[in-house]
Amino acid sequence: MAFDIDMIKKVYAQMAERVDKAREVVGKPLTLSEKILYNHLWDGNPTTAFVRGKDYVDFAPDRIACQDATAQMALLQFMQAGKAKVAVPTTVHCDHLIQAKDGASEDLKHANTVSSEVFDFLESVSNKYGIGFWKPGAGIIHQVVLENYAFPGGMMIGTDSHTVNAGGLGMVAIGVGGADAVDVMAGMAWELKFPKLIGVKLTGKISGWTAPKDVILKVAGIVSAKGGTGAIVEYFGPGATSMSCTGKGTICNMGAEIGATTSTFGYDESMERYLRATERADVADAANQVKEYLTGDAEVYANPEQYFDQVIEINLSELGPLLNGPFTPDLSTPVGSKMNEAATTNDWPIKVEWGLIGSCTNSSYEDLSRASSIAQQALDKGLKMKAELGINPGSEQVRYTAERDGILEVFENLDAKIFTNACGPCIGQWARYSDPKNAPKNSIVHSFNRNFAKRADGNPNTHAFVASPEITAAIAIAGRLDFNPITDKLINENGEEVMFDEPTGWELPPKGFEVKDNGYLAPVADGSGVQVTVSPTSERLQLLTPFEPIGNKIEGAKLLIKAFGKCTTDHISMAGPWLRFRGHLDNISNNCLIGAVNAFGKKTNFVKNQLTGEYGGVPDTARAYKAAGVRTVVVGDHNYGEGSSREHAAMEPRHLGVAAVIVKSFARIHETNLKKQGMLGLTFSNESDYDLIQEDDTFNFVDLNEFAPGKPLTLEVVHSDGSKDIIMLNHTYNQPQIDWYNEGSALNLIKKENNA
């Protein structure tokens, strides 16, 4: 039986009435995305046809999921909200704080030792506030959610950007910052700008070496890393229904890499099969009763150009395997000769040192079985591994079942390293080098989602390429980035030329899923007696102090850093070794913007302190300004804050005295996070004004006392020679968000309302 089945049935019970009403209000057939959104309006039955990309709308999500790195700050904030229990079903998953080094057993034992304080804190807070807790080793949050909580037509938010994975089961699942999650935990509405809609029509059928992963690699190559910003991507067509549920999850998962709000598929037989295989027949039965409401209207899919803001069509029968990268997930290259050309032209290392299979993107039973079919061929054909191979199963259920069925043994026979059921190398938790910063130039191939510099192993010289699990396995065996398993031969240990056959696998385990201990701990019914303690001397956890309002008079603010080029949340708040401080705001603030490239001098973590004229690290310089009572400003380029949902990238600058972040454009989640923390997130009205900002600039906000929705702000930029520039700044704040700013943070407003 499913978790929260009564809640799911309630969602379905109201769906027909609300969707029918929405269709009447909007005056036309609806996409699946619109059906789910209108069914989850905070105010109930629809009365307004919302304008995509413009109207802010209050929603009522069905559930929340948090991973351990982000859950710390989210729960520390929730503890201030004055609530006895979370208002909607919520879970915490311990998957980020487990380093990949020696293998599953040793790595898990090490994590339970070094992070016991954090795990104990998360378990006790979960127990106190009615939150389901998944222990370290239970699995990767998004795979566990897909197996246990995701349901067609539902809406969920999660404190991780790859929450969107649940779109593989027909949800609208959206990654958010912890402050957003706190709103919903506290029983308040969740606000989102009504998304635009991108339709992806899939025709034909995947076969041979092509995998669902190649669909999203292709889409990323078409729309770019920011092309999906502010939009839901909805997949449909015969190619969509022919794909497995977990394959759909892979595609939705990497929608985060194009900046999409989320991605989703309509309910179909593959989803029903997956629900029944994961012991949720009751959900499948309930979904079947309203299945016409769990997919887009037929008229929409017949004439998509009339109903979507953008339509992309991909013929899966013509799609071949791709490699995306390095250093960005949207640089797409076909395997083989095209990759050879690109690698030669760009001086990418042809030799591949590692292949990595797993992460929340590709760690299902189907993924492991297809990759193992390639590994088994290597054994049968006398091939030796030319690169090393690492495996991260997605959950204990997947791992146990794969071990039972001999899949893991195949990998182990090739000397692959089986890591813990956790994120590991995907998020920088890979202890590959003792000195990552000075490690050599090399190439790796993985089935993960992100491949920014230093993302996997901390080495800026690691060229990471994203591929399907089966291509990753084949390239790891061949040891060459330009290997094409469709056409290329390999020499085995007997000197014979051999070729791989096409991969094979199982959509679902033939003997069903099995697990002895899935790692779940249910909370007590009454948590009022549960004590949550945080040591005042802890280096890992720190109780929060509410932020003071910045106010409507910002004068004499100094430039902290003008970030040059790509500045992701990894640049603003690095993961890897810094994950251990995710529950301690002051300590983790020592990584604030240390990865951002300073436009003046093109160095990282090296900025000018205008008070002394000396240069130093960004956090130290920020602390010096803060101690002197001087506000600071951060300036950035396009798509500032792309990547992970981590709110630390907003909380750290706020903690260190940054009043405003001014950029050419924002990634959606990061802009929201800045607003939630009571900061100014602003964009240049004229993008070229970015070039006017100089190293010794001082900023005066001329009309901040007139801060209002839709009204640009005026900034006086005073240069060191006394000259001035007047710059106009745009913003997307509505009145409730301006109220957050005026109160110092969204949490301050929640607390004030709860205590009223």
Image: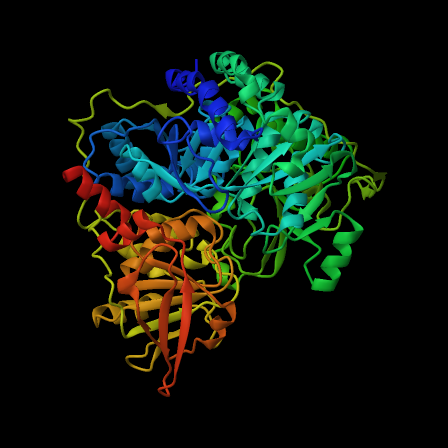
Q: How is the image coloured?
A: rainbow
User: Is 122 located above or below residue 529 in the figure?
Assistant: below
Position of 438 compared to 445: left or right? left
Q: Is residue 394 shown to the viewer in this render?
A: no
Q: Is residue 742 visible?
A: yes
Residue at the (28%, 75%) spot, across then down: 556
Residue that appears at 63% across and 41% down: 216
Where 326 falls versus 520 (above or below)?
A: below
List x then y, in percent, for residue 26. 51, 32
The residue at the far bottom in this view is 721
Count the numbered circles shown.
0
The quarter holding residue 478 reads top right
Say which of 474 and 158 sits in front.
158
Q: Is residue 390 left or right of residue 101?
A: right
Q: Position of residue 537 (x, y in %)?
A: 19, 50
User: In which image quadrant can residue 241 be found?
Assistant: top right
* Residue in the image at 63% along x and 49% along y: 223
Left or right? Give the position of 581 relative to 467: left
Foreground residue, 168 or 92? 168
Work out whether residue 68 or residue 246 is closer to the camera in this orientation and state it: 246
Residue 505 image offset from top left, x and y in percent:
68, 25
Q: Is residue 539 left or right of residue 51?
A: left
Quarter of the C terminus within the rendering: top left
* Quarter that holds the N terminus: top left
**Residue 225 screen position, x and y as percent:** 58, 52
Say if 716 sits above or below 682 in the image.
below
